[in-house]
Image (cartoon, coloured by chain):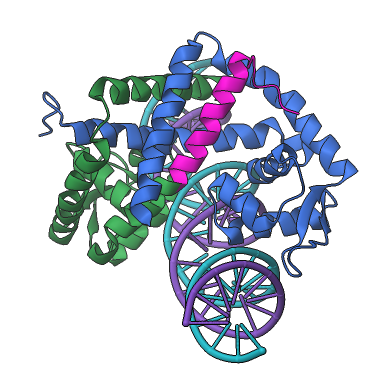
Chain colours: A blue, B green, C purple, D cyan
Amino acid sequence: MIDDEHPSDGEILTGLVLEIFRLNGRLLTAGDRLIADVGLTSARWQVLGAIHYADEPQTVSWLARSMGLTRQAVQRIVNELEVAGLVAFKANPAHRRAQLVMLTRNGQSAYAAADRRQKPWANALAKNFKRADLAAAQVLLAKIRGKLEAATE
Amino acid sequence: MIDDEHPSDGEILTGLVLEIFRLNGRLLTAGDRLIADVGLTSARWQVLGAIHYADEPQTVSWLARSMGLTRQAVQRIVNELEVAGLVAFKANPAHRRAQLVMLTRNGQSAYAAADRRQKPWANALAKNFKRADLAAAQVLLAKIRGKLEAATE
DNA sequence: CCTTAAATGACAATGTGTTGTCATTTAAGG
DNA sequence: CCTTAAATGACAACACATTGTCATTTAAGG
């Protein structure tokens, strides 16, 4: 039925794409379990990380762009995090509506707690893989993403 | 703030993971747009593909396992596809409740139409990438996934 | 043969993300 | 200065996937 003897370049890429779909799901569930008792989810954790890694408080739109998500998706998470007391809004001198988002003390400690969980987990998962291979894969995927984003415009 | 001078193996893998999250989203939206006027979505398309690639009609649970998703997720899509007339259920001699799923004539042509869209798209996206690099990335991601699945048990 | 465990489908609740639309605010151009 | 386009947040609708639970069915073990 299926001729995989001489796959085209596109077929090879398609195989990679399907693998990305599968792995994405596994990573999300693994992440959720890893930090469940910290009171976080993968999505909230990621948003906290984006805020953490920004040198200065940023707007929701900025965070969304840095994460490759839509404004709406990030806004929803940020609002929940604000209710949970993990982030706080701060007036933006450059824009009256677009408030700046920053971690609260609780947000910082929650992120730190998640990070303490994540580090040994990531190290264990990285074991037996060559860092050069991991890095090469990341570069390749980033290039593919860049091509997709360029095509969207 | 961030010491990326000497990243640990875990940090490199974390970078790869975040890239997978970003690329996953881009791929889904690109796929949705690619086949929107065929009346399909990425998820429905994937399920049709799983059914198509199975040599014989299979149960929903079998399809879910082959796709790395939960039974419930696939069942929902399959039920919608059945309403849309793209798949049909067939009595399973080996199990009274677990019916077998097969493509209808419309389902086959819908999948074929999507495939005709996908092929040139995939070839264009694969352009300028070495097939060895693409294949290597797929193998690496599959290994990572295998490790996650093994750890879940 | 009977009991028990495993697989499967059905149903509900929840979390996540996109698209679309609108009003407000800011920035840019004439 | 005024008009217009772009950015931003708010809100709603929809698609997708996980977890949890239950009843039914099948398979396995004693």
Residue B45 lies in the magenta stretch:
no
Residue situated in front as seen by the camera: A52 or C17? A52
Magenta residue span: B1-25
The image shows residue B66 at horizontal and vertical percentages of: 34, 34
Does A130 sit above or below residue D12?
above
Q: Residue at x 37, y 23 (%)?
A: B137
Observer able to see residue B153:
no
> Does A144 sit above or below residue A93?
above
Measuring from the top left, give residue D27's x and y in whole percent: 37, 28
Residue found at the very far right of the displayed protein: A105
Main SS of the magenta part reads helix
In the picture, the quarter occupied by the C terminus of chain B is top right
| Residue for point 15% across, 31% down | A8
Residue at horizontal 23 percent and vertical 60 percent from the top = B86
* Position of the N terminus of chain B by quadrant: top right
Q: Is residue B79 visible?
A: yes
Locate residue A81 relative to residue A17 in the image: left or right. Answer: right
- Does the magenta segment cover residue B12? yes
Quarter holding residue A91: bottom right
Residue A14: name its quadrant: top left
Residue B90 is left or right of residue B151, and the answer is left
Question: x, y percentage for residue A89?
Answer: 82, 58
Give residue D21's position: percent from left, percent from top: 64, 48
**Seen in the image, is B139 located left or right of residue B92?**
right
